[in-house]
Amino acid sequence: MVKKRSEIIEYSDKDSLVESHYAYDIVKNSKIVVFEWTLDIDIPTKYVSANINQYGYVPEDFYEGDLSDYWQFVHPEDRNRVKKEVYLARQVGETYSHRYRILTKDGQTRWVEERILYDMENDLIVNEKGIIIDITEQKLLEEKLERSKERYQRIFENSSVIIFTISLEGSINATNKMFRRTLGYDLKDIKDQDIRSILYDVNDLSLILNVAKEFIDESYDVEVVCKTGEIKTLNVSTNIIDSIDEEIEIVAVDISERKIDEQRIRFLSYHDKLTNVYNRAYFDEVIECLDRRSCYPFSIIIGDMNGLKVLNDHYGHKKGDKLLQDMAEICVKSCREKDVVCRIGGDEFAIICPNTNEKGAIAICDRIRELCLETEVELIGNPSIALGYSTKLDKDTTIDEIFKQADNNMYRNKMTYDKSTTGMFLNTLQTMLEQHNFEDKEHSESVVYYAIMLGRQLNLASSLMDDLGIVAKLHDIGKIGVPSDILNKPSSLSDEEYELVKGHAYFGYSILKAAPTTINVADYILHHHEWYDGNGYPDGIKGEQIPIISRIISIVDAYVVMTNDAPYRKAMSQEAAIKELKSCSRTQFDPELVTTFLSLMT
């Protein structure tokens, strides 16, 4: 016997139906259409909400009309698929959702999403309840998006520039043909690999991520490693293309050849053609950059080659060029990787030492001198270069002042080079002193030895050590103006003779003051007979008013004189000389310097 729809409703659970009607009231004015189905093949649709009218139908069309067979509501092309999906869902008996097309009353096609809930009794389905929601606009947008993705994929794959995508963790998701062609990696080789595996500098990953996240609209250069091991330079720009999956798109152009050309041009514009070290233009640029960025401390070393002109004049410029090349190589080998060696003139070199204090600059100068002594050059033997340095600690001193100070220190150092013109001048003065005075070469060498030893113990600056060596040699140069019979007198001097001897300090000062190359050490010669308590000569200055070089010479000269024979007395023992220095400490000699000197003698 065939049941009517009214009979099915009459025999159903009235309370349950009332509750359902409350729910239906909530949605009756919405776009959500509510259905309830039975499994009775004759009356499959038990209920449909009135807002089915949005598709041109009324509920009765599903109860007794053409749509009493619900599958006629489904688009013919989707009908078999939907049937299979529903039948499979019934076997599982769980909530189910799927999408399909339906036909409206006037024959239009709409997309809906159906969600089904099953009523179970004794593990059997007795009812199906569901809703359908119109998703046509959403579906159209999805289709449009899919077409857009397909179009993007074609552009992505066939672009004439390199394009690839990575996750925020740096995992490579996709690459295009140009990427694979330029870097040599197949997609299977590189997909899901960490991008750092192809970055020459792994720290560039942070740059890539930061630029993308901050939406910085600018490109930058990154070096990558090809499958062959070749290093290429890419100019890249980045942006986040998927805010949900947070995928970063990287667009790049291979600029390796352009970079090589730029580097070649830059090398030629910033390098000295003869020696291959940097030139004056690069020196000026780097030092101005360090100063502008306040990269303190940094030091500069100025070097002037000794003997180059003589070599050029006698043996030709090819020999001179070879000497310049050898010296450039010595400077490079003596410096650290961060130091910048430049040839800034015909026979002049300059070295920029970033993040380097005075002590570091001294160490580099020492290494250059040591390597010169270990190097043999045809015709001249050991190459030689006069060196001076200066350190910039802050912005208070200008670059010009630092350069001038280093240059002055270099010229002071150049004076000690025996074969140079200024060195010959000093040697001439030294010879004159030895011939005129009882103080022979051994006396001078002893004063130099003890003065340098004390200066090093005091950690004097390199420039002061250079001056100290010159003053130790020439401290008594003024005695060439004192009659030799007075200097060599075996008995005590008269007051008048003593005044003549005292005048040697000023006379020596006058000699050195007149020569441009020794003007800077003249004051030290003038004051080396001043006393710590102010009772010395010629000016009667005291304490630290006396230059430290003069105070050092005062002590070591007295010690050498006391421990060696003189025309007017025999040499003291070392113990007696030490006792005398202690006795005259605070009166004639600087007590702290005496203590330091005696610590070296015991």
Image: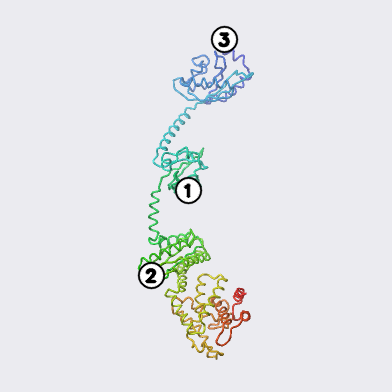
Label 1, on which residue?
200
Q: Nearer the viewer, mark 3 or mark 1?
A: 1
Could you tell me which secondary element the residue under label 3 belongs to? loop
Mark 1: which amino acid?
Tyr
**Looking at the image, is mark 3 or mark 2 earlier in the sequence?**
3
Q: Nearer the viewer, mark 3 or mark 2?
A: 2
Mark 3: which amino acid?
Val
Q: Nearer the viewer, mark 1 or mark 2?
A: 2
Badge 1 crowding class, 10 Å Cα cut-off, few under 14, some 14 to 19, many 20 or more, is some
Label 3, on which residue?
2
Badge 2 crowding class, 10 Å Cα cut-off, few under 14, some 14 to 19, many 20 or more, is some
Label 2, on which residue?
311
| Rendered-image quadrant of the N terminus | top right
Mark 2: which amino acid?
Leu
Q: Residue at x 35, y 67 (%)?
A: 317
**Looking at the image, is mark 3 or mark 1 earlier in the sequence?**
3
Badge 3 crowding class, 10 Å Cα cut-off, few under 14, some 14 to 19, many 20 or more, is few
